[in-house]
């Protein structure tokens, strides 16, 4: 058996959220349709290079934003990125702030989630192939390090750490809900990062979120309750900063490396519990891109 450390040439996936429908500086661009056994992803994927690094961009809600959070095909999105060779996902999201000290315009490198979504498919695994991955630490600290270093170098108002409350939506929260999430100690609120982060972990892709604060949700006595108009206005004003951050992060994330020290890329190593002879061949076929590494051996 070889004991060599694998050498990885990273391919960077960028999932662009509300107000971030393109990335700057991409060359050799090509929109491609990627089919998956889970159905269609949100849109075609934009393949290209930035500073020589292979990148794949996916607009989370599709170009023109036709798909609401509850109807996103999260499994298809992550599977499509995996079968496109993506090793690292940078997720960008507009969020409401649940803390006074995180005003609109701030960036938060999220490190925890509370998943209150309920109307979504949350796993690639199912009857016929059961797996339980750990999401105790749901994001990749290596990507967080790069976001922090590059964000600070750009002079952005960027904060390391924070809990993102995932609500189902599409309506924004009531004041009672917003107050409850504040009591829980959450930092920001949005509608999309779960099950996205859980599925990336099942697919053994390193994943981290940079959340861009657009509003104070509806709890702040001195600020109006969130509206789409307010979110779009703040995102437009901050889009150049977000794009500059992505552009600065990609050359760093794209450097040749070994396995992820946090183990995101080996999340399935001890996660499967269904005996080989009890596995459903049809499900195994669907799992080939995301779990083939452990299922084929
Ligand atoms: C347009 S406001 C609500 C919308 O914005 C966020 O989307 P994303 O995470 O894709 O930036 C939020 O989660 C909602 O989907
Ligand atoms: N206040 C908020 N609640 C949920 N999703 C959001 N996206 C941006 N702001 C939001």
Image (spheres, rainbow, N blue to C red):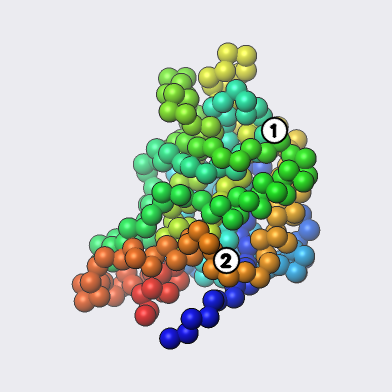
The residue lying at 24 percent from left, 67 percent from top is 274
Q: Is residue 49 left or right of residue 167?
A: right
Dot 2, crowdedness within 10 Å: few (<14), some or many (≥20)? many
The residue lying at 28 percent from left, 62 percent from top is 130
Numbered label tally? 2
Q: Is residue 228 visible?
A: yes
The residue lying at 64 percent from left, 38 percent from top is 159
Q: Is residue 105 left or right of residue 60?
A: right
Dot 1, crowdedness within 10 Å: few (<14), some or many (≥20)? some
- Residue 86 image label: 2
Q: Quadrant of residue 254?
A: bottom right
Disc nearer the start of the sequence (2/1): 2
Q: Quadrant of residue 52?
A: bottom right
Relative to residue 173, is residue 1 depicted above or below?
Answer: below
Element type at marker 1?
A: loop
Q: Look at the image and tell me in which quarter the C terminus lies.
A: bottom left
Residue that label 1 marks: 105
Q: Is mark 2 within 8 Å of ligand 1?
A: no
The residue lying at 46 percent from left, 41 percent from top is 113
Q: Is residue 31 visible?
A: no
| Position of residue 191 measured from the top left corner of the image (x, y, whole percent) | 49, 39
Q: Quadrant of residue 48?
A: bottom right
Q: Residue furthest top?
A: 221
Q: Nearer the viewer, residue 278 or 107?
A: 107
Q: Residue furthest left?
A: 278
């Amino acid at each position: 058996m070889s004991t060599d450390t694998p050498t990885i040439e990273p391919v960077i996936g960028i999932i662009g959220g509300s107000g971030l429908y393109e990335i700057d500086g991409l060359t050799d661009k090509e929109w491609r349709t990627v089919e998956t056994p889970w159905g269609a992803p949100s849109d075609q994927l934009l393949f290209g290079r930035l500073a020589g690094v292979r990148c794949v961009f996916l607009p989370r809600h599709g170009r023109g934003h036709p798909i609401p959070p509850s109807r996103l095909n999260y499994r298809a999105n992550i599977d499509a990125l995996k079968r496109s060779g993506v090793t690292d996902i940078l997720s960008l999201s507009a969020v409401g702030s649940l803390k006074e000290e995180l005003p609109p315009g701030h960036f938060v490198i999220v490190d925890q989630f509370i998943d209150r979504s309920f109307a979504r498919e949350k796993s690639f695994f199912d009857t016929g192939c059961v797996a339980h991955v750990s999401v105790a630490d749901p994001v990749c600290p290596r990507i967080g390090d790069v976001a922090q270093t590059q964000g600070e170098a750009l002079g952005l108002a960027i904060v390391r750490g924070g809990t993102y409350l995932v609500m189902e939506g599409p309506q924004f929260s009531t004041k009672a809900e917003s107050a409850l999430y504040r009591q829980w100690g959450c930092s920001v609120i949005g509608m999309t990062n779960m099950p996205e982060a859980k599925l990336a972990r099942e697919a053994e892709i390193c994943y981290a979120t940079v959340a861009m604060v657009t509003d104070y949700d509806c709890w702040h006595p001195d600020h109006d309750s969130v509206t789409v108009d307010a979110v779009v206005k703040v995102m437009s004003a901050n889009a150049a900063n977000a794009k500059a951050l992505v552009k600065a992060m990609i050359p760093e994330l794209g450097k040749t490396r070994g396995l992820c020290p946090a183990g995101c890329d080996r999340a399935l190593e001890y996660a499967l519990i269904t005996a080989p002879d009890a596995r459903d061949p049809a499900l195994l076929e669907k799992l080939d891109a995301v779990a083939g590494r452990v299922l084929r051996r």
